[in-house]
Amino acid sequence: MMIQVRYFSKGGNTEKLAKCIARTAGVQAQPIRNGASDRADILFLGASVYWGGIDNKVKDYVEQLDPKKIRKVVIFSTSALAQRAFPDIRKRLEKKGIPVAEENFYCRGEFTALHKGHPDTDDLKAAERFTMDILHQRNV
């Protein structure tokens, strides 16, 4: 199975999750600035919500993805406030005809005085469990 982990992270929170997910999946996490993915059975895609939306770089990355090369995308995200990146990224991927897993991973990320130390050890353990659950699904 071809697995890829791509992420966009300004403050390092989503990068921490990406590296944990990649380590659990036995691959290397790469920032989205490295361009669109090659063929992938599962593409773990990570982003965060900044000021109420996802960054334009994430939007551009999604636009570059080839629906013929991506079997399924699994979204993971962080934010300091209540919003998740999942709904926006999912909508964009589905518009391109790229299947998106119903399951997604989210945790708080540290921002100034908010959520100090997050993602923390418990968050990363939860990300590991989430990744293992995704990898063990038979319909992927």
Image (cartoon, rainbow, N blue to C red):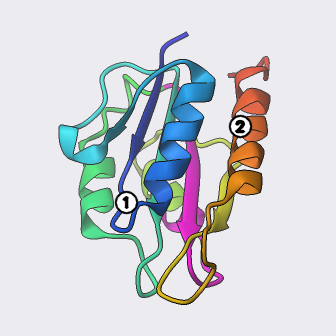
Depicted 37 relative to depicted 55: above or below: above
Image location of residue 51, percent across then percent down: 41, 87
How far across and down, in percent of the image, does residue 40 sit? Answer: 44, 21
Q: Nearer the viewer, residue 2 or 8?
A: 8
Q: Which residue is mark 2?
A: 128
Query: Which residue is depicted at the point 49% across and 61% down?
Result: 13
Q: Give the residues in magenta.
A: 71-88
- Residues 68 and 76: in front is 76
Horizontal side, residue 57 vs residue 105: left or right: left
Hey, which residue is sitting farthest left in the picture? Answer: 34
- Asked whether residue 91 is in view, the answer is yes
| Quadrant of residue 55 within the rendered picture | bottom left
On the rendered image, what quadrant is the C terminus found in?
top right
Relative to 85, say whether 37 is above or below: above
Say what amino acid the circle numbered 1 marks. Answer: Ser
Residue 118 rendering spot, x and y as whole percentages: 62, 67
**Along the horizontal axis of the image, is 123 left or right of 5?**
right
Magenta stretch: includes residue 78: yes
Q: Which mark is residue 9?
A: 1
